[in-house]
Amino acid sequence: MDGTPQEARVCVLHERLSACARGRPNDELLARMLASRACDLGGLPPDLGLDPDGFRRMLDRNFAGADWPAPAGVGPAVDPNRQPERDDLRRLLLAHRARIDASERWVAEIVAAGCMGGNHLWQDLGLRSRGDLNDLMATNFPELAARNDRNMKWKKFLYKQLCEREGIHACRAPSCQVCIDYAQCFGPEE
């Protein structure tokens, strides 16, 4: 944590949501993503990429009693030309979900929306670190997490999975050309 007022506000909002959590597998990470988005951190839209009904159901199920406003304002919009790509990512994630908790479906939608951002996936999701994203992937999509045995950046890894599924073996994630870490596709993200 960098100690900025914005990060302090994220912590307060995260604590408020965590106090209403029910101890389900994704509560902490969903609370962090919601709090980050409320503070305009990350690259997710205000509803985290969920439809309005799904957003409300997620809040009611995972954070019953939380005083959380409906998404407001304008966040990053998905380029309509990239919607098929987002749908492919969502299908990939859903096909590999752990099938332990209903929130995995929402997490798949949120991760697919995060992949539309231009930074590392953990940053676009509003998480604290790549370690949080590793936990999210291992909890929700354990088979995919196990396949990433070379510690590839998650966004690049997911796009590589899509390409390999289509028989394409020279595939780049869509934001590589603008990524400041272009030459470092493997290894730790700080």
Image: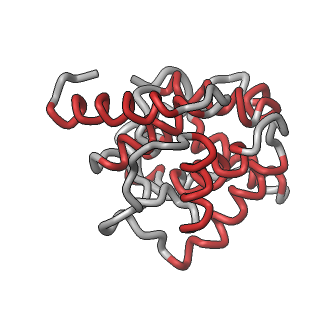
Q: Position of residue 67 (x, y in %)?
A: 39, 47
Quarter of the image for residue 152 reads top right
Q: Quadrant of the N terminus?
A: top left
Q: Nearer the viewer, residue 188 or 54?
A: 54
Residue sitting at the far front: 65
Examine the rendered structure and indicate whether residue 167 appears above or below residue 31.
below
Residue beneath the point at 53% across and 78% down: 80
Q: Is residue 177 above or below residue 2?
A: below
Seen as rendered, the residue at the extreme left is 5
Residue 144 appears left or right of 178: right
Rendered residue at 68%/23% (across/down): 150
**In this rendering, position of residue 60 left or right of residue 45:** right
Q: How many marks?
A: 0
Based on the displayed image, in which of its 4 quarters is residue 16 positioned? Answer: top left
In the rendered structure, the answer to whether residue 118 lies left or right of residue 49 reads left
Report x, y in % for residue 38.
33, 49
* 120 horizontally vs 166: left or right: left
Q: Position of residue 40 (x, y in %)?
A: 28, 50
Q: Which residue appears at 83% of the width and 59% of the height?
A: 166
Residue 47 versus residue 131 in the image, above or below: below
Given residues 90 and 81, the one toward you in this image is: 90
Q: Quadrant of the C terminus?
A: top left
Residue 169 locus on image (x, y percent)? 76, 50
User: What colouring does the structure picture have?
Assistant: secondary structure
